[in-house]
Image (spheres, rainbow, N blue to C red):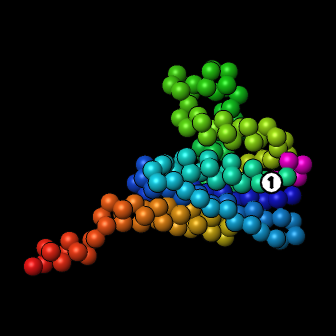
Amino acid sequence: MITVYADGSAIGNPGPGGWAAILVSEDGASRTLTGGAAHTTNNRMELMAATEALQVLPADVPSVVFCDSEYVVKGATIWRRDWKRRGWKSSSGKLVANLDLWQALYAVLDTRPLATFRWVRGHAGNRLNETADKLARAEAEKRKLARDTRTDPAPFGRQWEEGR
């Protein structure tokens, strides 16, 4: 059994975002995966975390993915059948948001029949969930810093000029 804690973050939502997944095997060995995007949403990053984690897992090993996103857990376990039946439309008749990432997640899940999802309450003291949250936030912060320094290449210089 491999346990995964996956989380996503976005600053501004949409804005710079990050995702993280912590994979832990039964013998306690762990692996951390992280990434992000310059302009995204927290839901997209939550989906990326789960998808990226599952992609590196062996298909024949049972795994459980813990997410504090009910959106991801319900989409992976409940909503898929109805969305597909309705032509990838939600109950309101609109195209499912983040369809590209849902379909990527479903493609991975189709090759990993032993994977399950469970919801975990966020910010409730679960050590691995808290760590995944911090890593995802750090990835979002990195992208925010990169964006801010590109759009404002010399903030000190401008302050200097204003001070004259």
Query: Is 33 located above or below residue 60 in the figure?
Result: below
Which residues, given as a range, are shown in magenta?
59-63
Residue located at (82% from left, 40% from top): 111
Q: Is residue 124 visible?
A: no
Q: Is residue 50 inside the magenta stretch?
A: no
How many other residues sit within 10 Å of disc 1, few (<14), some (14-19) or many (≥20)?
Answer: some
Q: What residue is pinned by disc 1?
A: 57
Magenta includes 61?
yes
Dominant SS of magenta comes to loop
In the visual, does 142 lie left or right of 68? left
Tell me the residue at 61%/40% (across/down): 101
Q: Please provide percent x and percent y for residue 121.
A: 62, 57
Which quarter of the figure has residue 158? Answer: bottom left
Q: Is residue 19 visible?
A: yes
Quarter-wise, where is residue 164 in the image? bottom left
- Tally of numbered discs: 1
**Residue lying furthest right in this view?**
60
Q: In this rendering, would 22 be left or right of 47?
A: right
Find numbered disc 1 in the image and state the secondary structure of the residue it sits on: loop
Q: Is residue 15 left or right of residue 125?
A: left
* Quadrant of image for the N terminus: bottom right
Q: Residue 2 location, x and y as percent?
A: 82, 59
The answer to which of 38 and 44 lies nearer the viewer is: 38
The residue nearer to you, when weighing 153 against 141, is 153
Q: Is residue 41 above or below residue 151?
A: above
Of 49 and 75, nearer the camera is 49
Residue drawn at the location 36% of the way across and 66% of the way down: 149
x and y percent of residue 56 in the render? 77, 54
The quarter holding residue 87 reads: top right
The three-letter code of the residue at mark 1 reads Leu
